[in-house]
Amino acid sequence: MVSFDQYILLPATEEHIEGITSIYNDAIENGIATFDTEQKSLNNRREWLQQHGPKYPVWVALACTEVAGWASLSRWSDRCAYDNTAEISVYIHPEHQGKGLGKQLMKAVLEQGKQHGLHTVLSRITEGNDKSIYLHQELGFNLVGVLKEVGTKFGRTLDVTMMQKML
């Protein structure tokens, strides 16, 4: 557990599923940070959480008892050769954005992943999300390249910036 400003950061558990799901579904419905286009059910997010663990953690930030944001490291691929590579994700409830919460959550999952043997972390950032690119650079991620026009959402075909951090 970590304290940051008015927030408590800690590993996610089943009791956080509703908040995680709500934040993610808002991003699906209203943003381009994820290329998911279908809302996720509580059972879907419960199964997703069960696929994580010490090496691929999920952390939440709580404001009182409400989930204000979450970050995760997920397996990059199911092929064994990629076992020490993860993809990072971070989603913050709109009311809590711009307060440094994403950075603190990312630090927490990166540190835990490193402690459990991860070697490299990748990130896919949708075109137009300059704040996310800046945040990743602040945390030591480097630009790998830009995948041109790889996803379509809300009638727009979008590029994705790939970034990487060696742990």
Image: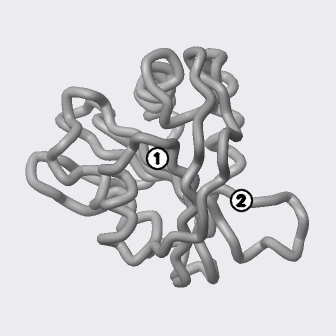
Q: Position of residue 88 (x, y in %)?
A: 54, 57
Residue type indicated by callout 2: Arg
For the residue carrying disc 1, how many other residues have a C-alpha within 10 Å: few (<14), some (14-19), or many (20+)? many
On screen, residue 94 versus residue 44, left or right, reads left
Could you tell me which residue is drawn at 44 percent across and 54 percent down? Answer: 11
Q: For mark 2, give the secondary structure.
A: strand
Taking depth in this image into account, of 100 and 109 the one nearest to the observer is 100
Q: Determine which quarter of the picture holds residue 103.
A: bottom left
Q: Position of residue 15 (x, y in %)?
A: 46, 33
Residue type indicated by callout 1: Ala
Could you tell me which residue is drawn at 20 percent across and 35 percent down? Answer: 96
Q: On screen, 125 above or below 48?
A: below
Quarter that holds the N terminus: bottom left
Taking depth in this image into account, of 22 and 158 the one nearest to the observer is 158
Depth-wise, is mark 2 or mark 1 nearer the camera?
A: 2
Q: In the rendered structure, find residue 75 and report the number of the disc placed on it.
A: 2
Q: Which residue is mark 1?
A: 12
Could you tell me which residue is drawn at 44 percent across and 34 percent down? Answer: 16
